[in-house]
Amino acid sequence: MSKRKLKNAHLPIGECVSQVLSPVSPCPCRHLEELLKRTAVHGESNSVLIVGPRGAGKTTLLRCVLRELSKETEVQKNLLQVHLNGLLQTDDRVALKEITRQLHLENVVGDKVFGSFAENLAFLLEALKKGDRSSSRPVLFVLDEFDLFAHHKNQTLLYNLFDVSQAAQTPIAVVGISCRLDVLELLEKRVKSRFSHRQIHLLSSLTFPQYLDRVRAQLRLPDDFPDGSFAEEWNASVKSLCEDGSVDEVLRRHFHSSTDFRSMHALLMLCLSRVSVAKPAIRPADLLDASRLCSADTKVNMLRGLSVLELCLIIAMKHLNDVYRGEPFNLQMVHNEFKKFLQRKSNSMYNFEHPVVMKAFEHLQQLELIRPVDGSSAKTQREYQLMRLMLDHSQIMEALQKYPQCPTDIKQWAASAFA
């Protein structure tokens, strides 16, 4: 198979999961399987990037290919796998330790001291040679969150892996997984020149009927389920559930917000958690409740847990945003706005000392409901450090409606602030 055919292969998200195990040949799973087989069986080094949005099926594609390859005896005996994640292996030192651990070479390395990352990696790969010392065992390196490895110092890990794969001395395959379409632009010239430039893109073309089919498939019980009568009743209830008008509306809303299968699984798991002996089927009301939980705004929930003082400061900030058209503010401006509210009230229950107000303001920053303006000087006094509010009008008003025993005058102040 030529490099040209492997390069820039595309697979729609809607077809990704369904075609991964199908015998259709012109799909990326076959390209990837052939690529990895050439490394595992014939000792040919390769590198490839799998690119697509989150939830598109990138990891599922790789897992299914590896599962198919593991059925071959030669691959099962020879191929070693190293799985790294850019969120966990944040620098090359940590990555090298993880490579050593996953290859079970801790005893081989021992207390040896190496001059560079390249020397250490070369020693590890040399230690993988077979008993006759004639050839090395092939190694598959899977780099999840590939774009984060590009932020390592000098991109040493990527450079050495691609360099080894190009040298053809040790058979390795490097598979990068990333959701950034511009990931190649992050690579240094020396790294990019050693990469094969093979890419597999997973693109979205999933339709709602296909999405609905996935929902049915996830909820249905298999034909070989031990209790046949229960399986028949359950599958009938699933069919009627998916035909319900309110359920169709909920699923359409989720489909238009995200076609991520993990999001769909989270929704269905919440529904299934309500199934019991007394309620042996999913009802439309269960799906509606699960949808509300899935779509609940976390920031609104955080606002409901604030103190009255912190809530007042939030309202003062939003009022400043309205007056000054989104310009940043500081603690002193917020406190002054809060004092205007207090002056209109004869009740002194909201009078707080300045240190208390400052403490509440800092707590809001810790919760990331406000954040400093980019480039603001760290030497500026805390009272005058510019901030931005990370909430909008609807979130604040929704939180006020749900706030337990929210004082009426605060609600009125909030309503007047947005008038």
Image (tube, grey):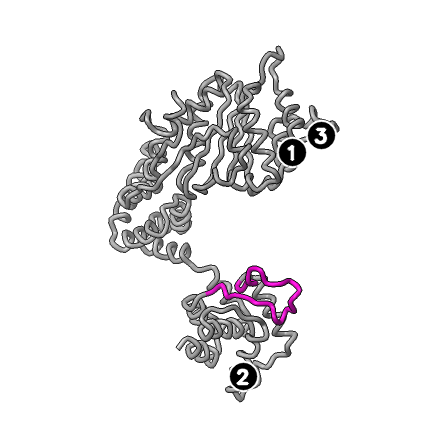
Q: Which residue is mark 2?
A: 342
Q: Quadrant of the N terminus?
A: top left
Q: Main secondary structure of the magenta part?
A: loop
Question: Residue 396 at x, y = what percent?
Answer: 45, 69
Q: Which residues are magenta?
A: 369-391
Amino acid type at mark 3: Gly
Looking at the image, residue 185 sits to the left or right of residue 255; the answer is right
Q: Quadrant of the C terminus?
A: bottom left
Per the model, the C-alpha gap separating discs 3 and 1 is 15 Å
> Is residue 374 on the magenta stretch?
yes
Viewer-nearest of labels 3 and 1?
Answer: 3
Amino acid type at mark 1: Lys
Amino acid type at mark 2: Leu
Question: Residue 88 at x, y = what percent?
Answer: 58, 41
Q: Which residue is mark 1?
A: 97
From the viewer's side, name the closer residue of 418 and 413.
418
> Is residue 148 on the magenta stretch?
no
Q: Which residue is mark 3?
A: 115
Badge 3: how crowded within 10 Å, few (<14), some, or many (20+)? few
Viewer-nearest of labels 2 and 3?
Answer: 3
